[in-house]
Every structure is written in structure tokens, then in C-alpha cells.
Image (spheres, rainbow, N blue to C red):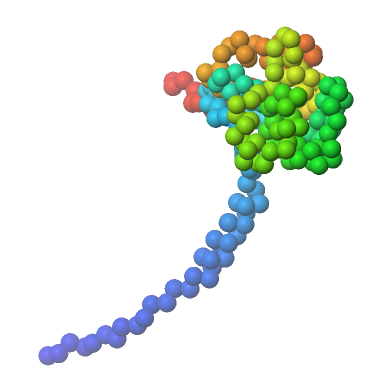
Amino acid sequence: MSRAKIQKKSMFIDMTAMSDVTVLLLTFFMLTASFVKKEPVQVVTPASISEIKIPETNIMSILVGPDGKIFMSLDKQSDMAATLEAMGKEYGLSFTPQEIKKFSLCQTFGVPISHMKSFLALSTEQQDRTLKNQGIPCDSIDNQFKAWVRNARATNHDLRIAIKADQQTPYAVIKKVMNSLQDLKENRYNLITSLKSGPEE
């Protein structure tokens, strides 16, 4: 007795709904993503169990590399431009509107003020290569770091200071940075750390 043959039907899966969900998720992540600033040196922050988050606006970031070089950044282009103009007046330098505009677009800065004009004349790629070998002077003879902080604070009184230092940075450099802030009566600042799990019970 022969078996009855079952007709095979082609399967069709409607992927329209899946495609819609994928596009919506992609759009959501693109709109909510926050971009990480390009930093001239790689910094491995020390670990802590603190989960306090710093605000996302009105931030003055101080980056201290493993070799003790100091870099800074401000999150608003208008603050960057006004701070550079104030530094120029303090050190007897004048910057063109093009130089000020180019400086305001920098994600991080950190060269002696006397080298700033030549630094701004470089291309973005040349600036990236040059920046990692520079750093803002923070010695007792010429503490330009203190001048940058003072002028940035005068530009925007609502700035919050965040210090990001490498775990291998010499303590003497961190102390110098903190002493400079204390000289300006800047006693409130955040130290950026990486999160570690608490002790096991």
C-alpha cells in the first residue's frame, strides 16, 4: 500500500517587523550615545568603589599622564575661546580670529603658551603628534596651569573641576596640581576613577 505524499510548502517569514525594530534601536543608540574625547596620552585611572557621577556640562577636565605631563579641556567652545583670549592678554600675546576658532575646536590642549601660535598653525594630525610630548608648565617659576584654571574660572563661574590621573603618575605631580588649585581657593574637585567591585561578604 503506497503512502500518501504530503505536499511541501515553501516557508515565508515576514522580516518587516524585525527590520523596523532594528532601525529604531540603531537610531536610539545613535541619539543617546556620548562621544569620548580624544586624549593625547593613555591614562589608566586607579580603581575605587565610588559611584558618584560628575555632571556632563560645565566641566573643566585636567588630564595628568603617567610621566606627569598636564593637559586640559573645557566642554564648551565659547569657554575655550574666551579663556585663550584671556591668557593672551595675561602673557602679552594676540591671537587671530582664525586661531581662536581653531583652538575652540580642540578637544584637549596642553602646550606652553609661548608655543600656542605655532601649535595652532599645525594640522590636526601634527597637533596630535606634538601634543603628547608637550604639557602645560606647572612649576614654581612659571605656573601656567594655575593661569589657565584662573582664566577659565573667570570665564565660566559654574565650571566643575575633574582630575583624571594615571595610577602610575608620581604623587609629587598630583600634589603640585592640588596645591595650585588650593592657591586659587579651588578646594572642590572630582577625581575620576574606574569602578571596582566592593569587598566580598
In the rendered structure, the answer to whether residue 153 lies left or right of residue 1 reads: right
Name which quarter of the figure residue 67 lies in.
Answer: top right
The answer to which quarter of the image holds residue 163 is top right
Q: Residue, x 76% and y 32% (percent of image)? A: 117
Where on the picture, by quarter, is residue 107?
A: top right
Residue 25 placed where, x, y %?
Answer: 58, 56
Q: Is residue 5 visible?
A: yes
In the image: residue 174, left or right of residue 140: left
Is residue 48 something one can see in this rendering? no
* 175 is higher (above) or lower (below) than 108: above
Numbered label tally: 0
* 198 over 122 or under it: above or below: above
Residue at image coords 75%, 37% = 103
Quarter of the picture containing the C terminus is top left
Q: Residue furthest left?
A: 1
Where residue 123 appears, x then y in whole percent? 67, 41
Q: Residue at x 62, y 32 (%)?
A: 130
In the picture, the quarter occupied by the N terminus is bottom left
Residue 197 x, y percent position in the rendering: 49, 26
x, y (%) of residue 32? 65, 48
Above or below — where is 75 with respect to 19? Answer: above
Q: Is residue 21 left or right of residue 104?
A: left
